Amino acid sequence: MAFLNKPENDAIIHYLIQLKEAELLALLMQVFHLRGNQTINENWRHNWMIVKHYDELRKGSTTYFVPESLGGDYPGPALGLPASGNYDEDGFYQSGGCPECGLWVACTEKLAICPYCGSQVPCT
């Protein structure tokens, strides 16, 4: 399934699907961070972030807390980078609530970085 039917995107898509999940998340967060710093108005900055993780096993069964500025409750945790900086793992199987802002975060390791406030999140 191609969302952007442009032949020049095939190599990019092929590269991205070869990455481990944590590597892909780190790459996209870096792109979103850089994109957010590109602004057309000095008084306004866009913030991009990956905020959902969809898990077939939990479909519709759980609601996680999200800071009000992100719109309240929604199904699925936010994706957090591993605090260790090791992006070689696959699978966002660890999760926990951020002690600072309350956001529910999933990670590939037991200690994540909250994508909302930057705090360390212990995961189980």
Image: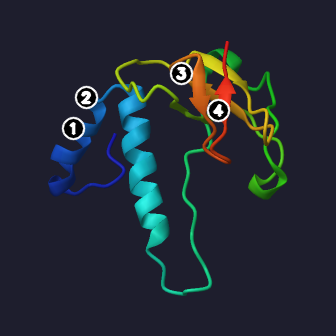
Occupied quadrant, residue 11: top left
State the residue at coordinates (77%, 40%): 74
Residue 18's tag is 2
Q: Which residue is mark 3?
A: 92
Q: Amino acid at mark 1?
A: Tyr
Rounded to the nearest angstrom, the CA distance separating label 2 from label 3 is 16 Å
Secondary structure at badge 1 equals helix
Secondary structure at badge 2 equals helix
Q: Amino acid at mark 4?
A: Gln
Q: Nearer the viewer, mark 2 or mark 3?
A: 3
Q: Nearer the viewer, mark 3 or mark 1?
A: 3
- Residue neighbourhood size for the residue with mark 2, other residues' Cα within 10 Å, grouped as few (<14), some (14–19), many (≥20): few
Secondary structure at badge 3 equals loop
Rounded to the nearest angstrom, the CA distance separating label 1 from label 4 is 30 Å
Question: First in sequence: mark 3 or mark 1?
Answer: 1
Residue 101 visible to an observer of this rendering? yes
Rounded to the nearest angstrom, the CA distance separating label 3 from label 4 is 16 Å
Q: How many marks?
A: 4
The vertical placement of 52 against 58, above or below, is below
